[in-house]
Amino acid sequence: MVRKPTSKETARKPNMREAILAAAEELFATNGFNAVSVRDIAHAAGANPGSVTYHFKTKDGLLLEIYRRHCGPMNLRRSELLTAARRVRDLQDRLEAIVRAYVVPAFTSGSDLAGGGARFTRLRAVMSAEGNEVARKIIAQTFDDTSHAFIDAIHDSLPHVPRTDIVWRSHFLLGALYYSLVTPERVSRLSRGEADGGDPANAIEQLVQATVAAFQAPALDQAAPTRRRTVATTKT
Amino acid sequence: MVRKPTSKETARKPNMREAILAAAEELFATNGFNAVSVRDIAHAAGANPGSVTYHFKTKDGLLLEIYRRHCGPMNLRRSELLTAARRVRDLQDRLEAIVRAYVVPAFTSGSDLAGGGARFTRLRAVMSAEGNEVARKIIAQTFDDTSHAFIDAIHDSLPHVPRTDIVWRSHFLLGALYYSLVTPERVSRLSRGEADGGDPANAIEQLVQATVAAFQAPALDQAAPTRRRTVATTKT
DNA sequence: TGATCTTTTGTACGATGGTACAAATCTCAT
DNA sequence: ATGAGATTTGTACCATCGTACAAAAGATCA
């Protein structure tokens, strides 16, 4: 079933290398970078620890390669979807399409790589929480363009909301997205089994619905036209 | 300035113990649990590594103690604010008050402990991302009651929204809250300096405003009364 | 087949990790 | 001041870490 690639152009037997990448991705995404040892990865991949060094030189190099594999395809997919979304006439529909263009590739496979985009997005969430240096560099130089493109697109469809507010709200979107992937079981638990936090389709719909409404909230300056906030700053 | 406590009731010199707790909190919150060594903590606190073992027995014990110090006060504060919020008559205002009661203690000092609640909340975010076992246990048994109380309160003020949707949206709220504390500089960067992601007051207002709107979004079942979602599922 | 190159294995080294523990030091009621 | 208990220090043990490297095994093609 697994097609042997006749080994010509580059003459590789990609099995082991791919297995290591997949195992590392899974382990890093669930346990963080520092908690996972090269030996753990090798064991999970059915490989020898030395093999990891051979293919990726260092542990950082392994992480770097994981990012390289995913960033391109996911950003490409987002660009395509964003371009399509910007063409939607109705402003309300367009906003939803834009949000969907941002969210969907993060959950579903951004390429034909095994495991889909969800695992990689979860990895990004965990690395960002750990303050991983390798990840921080790659992310800033790879995703900031995309983020700006989305912010601009959203701003176009919500001209009355200041750009600053849109930045905040898209930041919240990414945080919610990350957290949905990091602790999906919390949703199942708090809903007492009525919702499956691990179901991507479910998460996407909920996230899109909630986020669109959040973006459409009135701007902060002109917030609460009748009363201004008074409550809950006081004690009992 | 620092009051020496006459050392009677329990006869301690709390300086070192407190210094270790503070240093650990700071280091864990910024670098994660596994990346920080006991020696790092001791060094940052101006203490000897053995001192950490003496006061907290193990590294896990140290983390446990950090949680113990913060969970109680923060939950208490939230309960007080929630009780007050539930008394608000106007449904819209009540919802905002409830959200504020959830958000504010997470950002500001939940007790008189140094550093305020923001550092501890960031710590929780990082631990949750790392899948830390100690933290997971404590959190589930300490915060789930509070979470349910908030979900119920929100449900009361939004009777037409299914509980499931409210669970999802409060999950998104927590994710957004966490992420705001984990990478505040991203907000500053993406807003090109127009917003200060590190300013708690700013973050709170933005988060409350956006979240209230998200909670008020139509329920998923009856979503999009005119058209249903069609866009952005198609390619270019 | 045998020469050559790629990949995998096995093992080892130096660094660093958490933790234990005895000795030194400090605190304070008597 | 002195003795008892609390705290701090210094050090050492053992496990595990990332990585290096030589040898074994496998693949490729003249």
Image (cartoon, coloured by chain):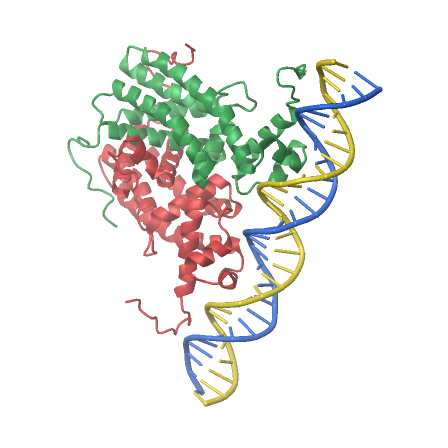
Chain colours: A red, B green, C yellow, D blue
In the displayed structure, would residue B141 be above or below residue A133? above
Q: Position of residue B16 (x, y in %)?
A: 65, 27
Q: Where is residue B6 in the image (x, y as percent from the top left)?
A: 68, 14
**What residue do we see at 38% from left, 37% from top?**
A179
In the displayed structure, would residue B139 be above or below residue B100? below
Residue B121 seen from this side: yes
Q: Quadrant of the N terminus of chain B?
A: top right
Left/right placement of residue B157 relative to residue C14 reads left
Q: Position of residue A212 (x, y in %)?
A: 29, 32
Q: Nearer the viewer, residue A182 or A143?
A: A182
Residue B162, quarter of the rendered image: top left
Residue A144 seen from this side: no
Q: Where is residue B7 in the image (x, y as percent from the top left)?
A: 66, 16
Q: Nearer the viewer, residue A73 or C27?
A: C27
**What residue do we see at 22% from left, 29% from top?**
B219
**What residue do we see at 33% from left, 38% from top?**
A185
Q: Nearer the viewer, residue B152 or B230?
A: B152
Residue A112, quarter of the rendered image: bottom left
In the displayed structure, would residue A141 be above or below residue A51? above
